[in-house]
Image: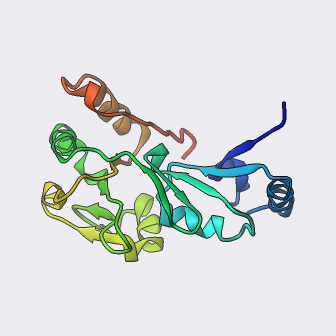
Amino acid sequence: MAVRLIALDIDGTLLDSRWQLPEANRQAIAEATRRGIEVALVTGRRYDFAMPVARKLDSPLTMIVNNGALIRSKEGRTHLRHLLPQSIARQVLELTKPWREGAAVIFDRPLQNQLMLEVLDPDDSMRYAYYSRNKEFIGIAKPLETCLTEDPIQVMLSGKVALIREAESALRGAPFVENFALAVTSYESK
């Protein structure tokens, strides 16, 4: 059976440990698309945060981003969107108040206010580098629930592994757990 699709994660798969795109990977993707194989970049990243990597590839790509909630072409054409109903997002935010410092609400919007935060702390060394690279996409809403004027793509929590495990446990035990999907990525070594 011939290969028809290659799906690649970005971080740690397509990119090396220094977040660089090896020339061998670029050439392999170009050769695959030349042979008619579809290539998809699959990532937890937002579309706009994945695009700098996609632009380094001179090949047609399908972008599966936000942990699968959004599928777009490299050119920006949306093929599929799975949004989180506002009411469920509000319940998630209410349940995760103890971890609010690391909470964000992600929307499918052009540029500004894609990533909504309650606070942007320049002294937060763990998150501020990411915030700095994405400042054109970030908005502030205090309290965070006030940003829920439309269905978001996701509610995201970030922080130290032990704290995120607490939040994960609370969410898995939520009475409304069947109304949302939970995707967890942990970096034990960080």
User: What residue sits 28% from the left and 53% below the top?
Assistant: 152
> Where 53 sits versus 100, above or below?
below
- On the picture, is 85 further left or further right than 40? left
- The one of 104 and 58 positioned closer to us in this rendering: 58
User: What residue sits 34% from the left and 51% below the top?
Assistant: 153
Could you say where residue 136 lies in the image, as x and y percent from the top left?
A: 39, 77
Task: Residue lying at the far bottom in this picture: please name it.
Answer: 136
Q: Is residue 44 among the parts visible in the rendering?
A: yes
User: What residue sits 54% from the left and 42% below the top?
Assistant: 187
Residue 134: quadrant of the picture: bottom left
User: What residue sits 30% from the left and 55% below the top?
Assistant: 104
Figure colour scheme: rainbow
Q: Is residue 170 among the parts visible in the rendering?
A: no
- The one of 174 and 36 positioned closer to us in this rendering: 36
> Where 38 sits versus 61, above or below?
above
Could you say where residue 121 lies in the image, as x and y percent from the top left?
A: 30, 67
Could you say where residue 183 lies in the image, as x and y percent from the top left?
A: 43, 36
Residue 167: quadrant of the picture: top left
Residue 23: quadrant of the picture: bottom right
Quadrant of the frame with the N terminus? top right
Could you say where residue 86 lies in the image, as x and y percent from the top left?
A: 19, 48
> Where 28 sits versus 178, above or below?
below
The number of callouts visible is: 0
- On the picture, is 67 further left or further right than 143? right
